[in-house]
């Protein structure tokens, strides 16, 4: 299997070891579980299934950033306390992902790793990598020569992206515009914790460095997340990892965002399709197939409202074909299907191959009993072999 590594700027062969770790930046629980989130989570789930099928024991860690900037404004908008919003959104996310078979081994929450974050900041402070300004602790980017090497952005691009995505490059008094927050005072209504740097809360990025070190150990084989996380989130995470003796990442694999009605699907644009609305009406496996089929992690994709009906028809065909007794010789299909999947998880192409095989089986072509067996193996690696109803974890 090869995946495009953002840091190296090229496809990298995934070396399949006995024990592997996959860390995926999950959701901030305020607009959780729209189909864009699900398509992305499904991609990493398929990667894990594919590696497992090849003999690896894969530990999947998918975090939840439950201490973060966008949460308070959302809670205020809904006129509910911060933690009520967070708990409700997390419960919904867990229910949706469980029904869709998007399993992971650990789902750590930032709020449960505050002590680890404080220790990590102290480690970086001892190494001279931090400074403090009015209760905010910053990471001193000038001390990290590799900074910028993940995104390959130049200085101006980094400043612009930081401004757009939650950074504070324009705050006066900082040593340098790109220095980023490790710890900061909380706003009224936000969670607040005691620390050696004063009461407050962690910055956005430090949580992932601490959770990956804690739950994956020294090596993360594949680090995933949406393409919008490359900068600043993952650039800063990588800098922290170097500064605190954190995990080392083998491949940074980013998945494109899903479009809807001509734009990236996002809460702020108001163009989202919630998983819960689809799951109320459809077989979860149909919803999963609709998400997978609409989406290539490298090329992106667009959600269309007709996707679910198309997926329902397709899955019905696949299930009938998988129950058949014979079909064509499977070698050609297996080779094509796994070649597509193993090349940056080209889901629409792989699904096209499965369609072809199912079509041949249903048309009565061939008398090879291995034909339907191959189709069942495709369903399994795509995670579509679940029952039609909630199958638990
Ligand atoms: Zn993260």
Image: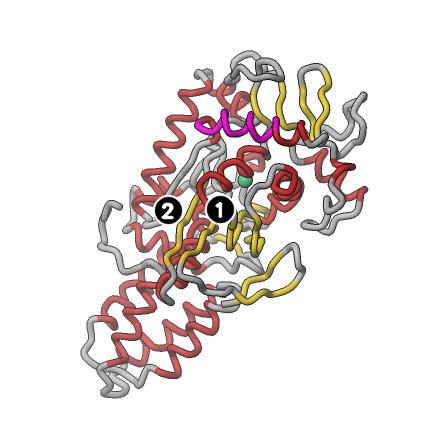
Image x and y of residue 214, in percent: 47, 38
Residue nearest the observer in this picture, 39 or 132: 132
Among the 4 quarters of the image, the one containing residue 99? top left
Is residue 117 a member of the stretch shown in magenta? Answer: yes
For disc 2, the marked residue is 104
Q: Which residue is mark 1?
A: 24
The answer to whether residue 325 is above or below residue 166 is: below
Q: Residue furthest top?
A: 188
- The residue lying at 55 percent from left, 67 percent from top is 13
**Mark sitting earlier along the chain (2/1):** 1
Magenta-drawn segment: 112-122
Query: Within the displayed image, which quadrant is ligand 1 positioned in?
Result: top right
The answer to whether marks 2 and 1 mark residues whose Cβ atoms lie closer than 8 Å is: yes
Other-residue count near label 1 (Cα within 10 Å), few / some / many at <14 / 14–19 / ≥20: many
Which quadrant of the figure has residue 139?
Answer: top right
Q: Nearer the viewer, residue 323 or 380?
A: 380
> Is label 2 in a helix, a strand or a loop?
loop
């Amino acid at each position: 299997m090869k995946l495009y590594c953002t840091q190296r700027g090229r496809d990298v062969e995934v070396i399949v070891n006995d024990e592997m770790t996959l860390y995926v930046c999950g959701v901030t629980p305020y607009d959780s579980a729209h189909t864009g989130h699900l398509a992305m989570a499904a991609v990493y789930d398929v990667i894990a299934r594919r590696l497992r099928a090849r003999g690896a024991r894969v530990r999947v860690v998918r975090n939840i950033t439950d201490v973060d900037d966008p949460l308070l404004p959302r809670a205020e908008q809904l006129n509910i306390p911060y933690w009520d919003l967070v708990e409700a959104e997390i419960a919904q996310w867990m229910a949706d992902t469980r029904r869709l078979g998007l399993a992971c081994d650990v789902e750590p929450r930032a709020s449960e790793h505050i002590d680890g974050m404080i220790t990590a900041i102290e480690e970086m402070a001892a190494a001279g990598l931090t400074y403090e300004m009015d209760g905010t602790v910053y990471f001193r980017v000038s001390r990290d020569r590799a900074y910028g090497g993940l995104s390959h952005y130049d200085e101006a691009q980094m400043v612009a992206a930081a401004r757009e995505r939650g950074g504070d490059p324009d705050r006066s008094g900082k040593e340098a515009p790109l220095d980023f927050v490790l710890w900061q005072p909380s706003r009224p209504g936000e969670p607040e914790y005691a620390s050696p740097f004063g009461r407050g809360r962690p910055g956005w990025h430090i949580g992932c460095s601490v959770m990956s070190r804690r739950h994956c150990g020294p090596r993360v084989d594949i680090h995933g997340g949406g393409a919008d996380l490359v900068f600043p989130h993952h650039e800063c995470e990588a800098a922290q990892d170097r500064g605190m003796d954190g995990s080392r990442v083998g491949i940074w694999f980013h998945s494109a965002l899903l479009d809807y009605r001509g734009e990236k699907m996002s809460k702020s644009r108001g163009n989202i399709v919630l998983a819960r609305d689809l799951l109320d009406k459809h077989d979860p496996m149909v919803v999963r197939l609709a998400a997978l089929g609409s989406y290539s992690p490298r090329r992106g994709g667009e959600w269309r409202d007709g996707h679910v009906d198309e997926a329902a028809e397709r899955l019905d065909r696949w299930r009938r074909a998988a129950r058949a007794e014979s079909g064509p010789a499977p070698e050609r299909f297996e080779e094509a299907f796994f070649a597509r999947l193993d090349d940056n998880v080209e889901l629409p192409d792989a699904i096209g191959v499965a369609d072809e095989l199912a079509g041949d089986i249903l048309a009565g072509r061939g008398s090879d009993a291995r034909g339907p067996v191959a189709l069942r193996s495709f369903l399994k690696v795509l995670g579509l072999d679940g029952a039609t109803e909630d199958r638990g974890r």
